[in-house]
Image (cartoon, grey):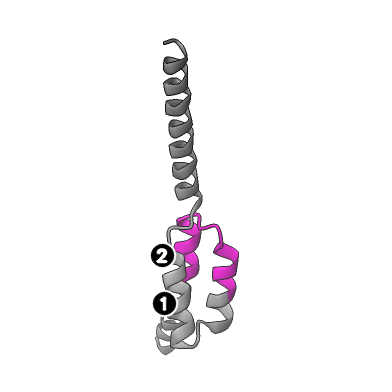
Amino acid sequence: MEVLLSILIIITSLCLYFIPAALASHREHNQKLAILMVNLFLGWTFLGWVAAFIWACTNNTLQSDSKKEAKRIQELEELVHTFHHQSKK
């Protein structure tokens, strides 16, 4: 029973330890490998773990990049439409 409890504690600890890396991977963060390295090598210090967690929560994701790109495309389409509309006058 003690062995099972020890294994459960170890697995739970590892899951908690790698929350920043898992979060970065789930959010498709652009720097997920770097976050994993910080988490792996500096996560044992509280400051390293917090830094990796905050970094994983930043908005530097593939999803945010695609939203920015969509916004740029929309702005360009509006500019082309405006230019085309003005050139007809």
Residue lying furthest front: 89
In the rendered structure, are the residues bearing label 1 and label 2 in contact, judged by CB atoms less than 8 Å apart? no
| Front in this rendered view, residue 9 or 88 | 88
Q: Secondary structure at mark 1?
A: helix
Residue appearing at x 54%, y 83% in the figure: 42
- What is the quadrant of the C terminus in the image? top left
Residue appearing at x 59%, y 69% in the figure: 34
Residue type, numbered disc 1: Thr
Read off the residue under disc 1.
12
Is residue 17 among what the camera can see? Answer: no
The prevailing secondary structure element of the residues shown in magenta is helix
Read off the residue under disc 2.
57
Q: Earlier in the sequence, mark 1 or mark 2?
A: 1
Give the percent coordinates (x, y) of residue 28: 50, 54
Residue 82 sits in quarter: top left
| Front in this rendered view, residue 26 or 50 | 50
Please tell me whether residue 30 is drawn above or below residue 73 in the rendered image. below
Residue appearing at x 43%, y 63% in the figure: 58
Give the percent coordinates (x, y) of residue 44: 50, 86
Q: Which residues are magenta?
A: 15-37
Residue 47 sits in quarter: bottom left
Q: Secondary structure at mark 2?
A: helix
Give the percent coordinates (x, y) of residue 68: 46, 44
Q: Nearer the viewer, mark 1 or mark 2?
A: 2
Is residue 61 among what the camera can see? Answer: yes
Q: Tell me how far mark 1 sits from mark 2, CA to CA.
A: 22 Å
Residue appearing at x 55%, y 57% in the figure: 30
| Front in this rendered view, residue 7 or 32 | 32
